[in-house]
Image: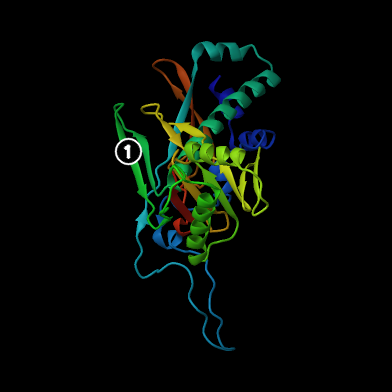
Amino acid sequence: MFNIIKSLFTPQAIIARLKTMEPLKTIVMDTLFKSRPNHALPIVGSDMIHSVVRAAPVVRRGSPAVAVGGDSRSLAWYEPFPIRIKAIISAIELNNLKVMGSADRNSWAREKTDFLRNTVRMTAEALATQAISGAVAWPLKIEGGGWDTYEVDWPGMATYTATKKLSAADADLVTALTILRGMKKKLIKNGLGGGLQIWAGSQVYDKLAQMALDHKGTGKFRVELSEAGVNVGGYLIIDRSEVLINPQDQSEVQVVAPTHLMMVSTTAGHKMPYCAIDDLDGQLRATPFFVKPVKKDDPSTIELIAESKPFPIPNMRGICDCVAV
C-alpha cells in the first residue's frame, strides 16, 4: 500500500495535480510579494536583502560601469526557517484506499495535496504580513512539544506622525487628506512613490467611512464610499481588517493594526524567495511546495510531510506607517 501512496505523491504527480487546482489567493503575497523566485541556497545573504532598485548615474562612453545593489564588502547571512507540516494517514484510511479505484484514489490525493498547500500558503502569508510591519515574530515549534519564537527584524520603515489624528473631535476629511499627502511625501522622498496602495486598519477605515457618509458635497475634492474603499481626493483607502490566527495562542494577526494607516509601494522590489529545503528526498532543492510520504510503524501510519521555506524580504523604504486614530 505504501508504494501506491508513493506513486500518488511523486514530484511529477504533484506538479500535474497543482496545475489543475485553482490558484491560491492571499492579500499580502499577491499584492507585495509577487516576485517569488527559487533560491538555490538554504540561507539568504544580506547583499540580496539590501539590494534596493534605485536610479543610477550615467557614465561617459568607454568609462567603467557603476556598481549597483548591496554592499558586498560586508556580507552577513540570514537563516530562513522552514514550514514543515504533516497529515497523518491511519491504517483505517489506508484500508479504505485499498478498495478504491484509480480515479477515487487520485481524488483523495488531490484533497490531501490541497489541504497541505493551503496550510503552507497561509503560513507564508502570515510571515509576509508580519514582515511588512517591520518584524517577524512567529511561533516556532521545538522538539518535545514546546514553543519558541522565529524572529526577523526589518528596520527602515518610513513613518509619518499625524499632527492631528482622525479621532480628534474636530477631525474632518481635510485632516485625512493631510495625513495621506504627508505619507505619500515620505515615500516620494525615498524614491518609491509608484504603484501606491493605501491600507487601513478597522478603526481607521470606520472613521473614514463615516466621514465620507457625513460629507456634504461642495465640489472642492472627490469623496466617495464604495465597495472598493473610501476615496478621499483621489486617494483610495482599502479596508485591510483581515486577520490570520496565531497557531500557538490562537490570537489574531492583523494585516494592518486597527489604529494604523499604511501606504505601500507595490513597485518597491519586495520579494519572497523560496530557499532550498532541508530534505534529501527533495534533493535539497529550492521549491515552493514539496510533499513526501513516510511510513511509520508504531502506530502503523503513513505521514504526508509537506515542506517549504519562504523568506519574505520587504523593502521597508517603500512602506509608510501612520498611527491615524
Callout 1 amino acid: Thr
Residue at the image point whose x is 53% and y is 45% from the top: 199
Residue 6 % position (x, y)? 56, 28
Q: Quadrant of the C terminus?
A: top left
Pointer 1: what residue? 149
Q: Secondary structure at mark 1?
A: strand
Residue 117 % position (x, y)? 55, 33
Q: Where 24 sits versus 217, above or below?
A: above
Q: How many other residues sit within 10 Å of disc 1, few (<14), some (14-19) or many (≥20)?
A: few
Q: Does residue 273 show up?
A: no
Residue at the image point whose x is 57% and y is 88% from the top: 60
The part of the image, by quadrant, that contains residue 141 is top left
- Using the image as rendered, state which of residue 187 and residue 77 is in the foreground: 187
Residue 156 % position (x, y)? 39, 58
Residue at the image point whose x is 59% and y is 11% from the top: 96
How is the model colour-coded?
rainbow
- Using the image as rendered, state which of residue 155 and residue 323 is in the foreground: 323
Lateral position of residue 223 relative to residue 277, left or right: right
Q: Where 166 sits versus 299, above or below?
A: below
Q: Where 37 sits versus 107, above or below?
A: below
Total marks placed:
1
Q: Quadrant of the N terminus?
A: top right
- Using the image as rendered, state which of residue 92 and residue 233 is in the foreground: 233
Lateral position of residue 153 relative to residue 258, left or right: left
Q: Does residue 51 show up?
A: yes
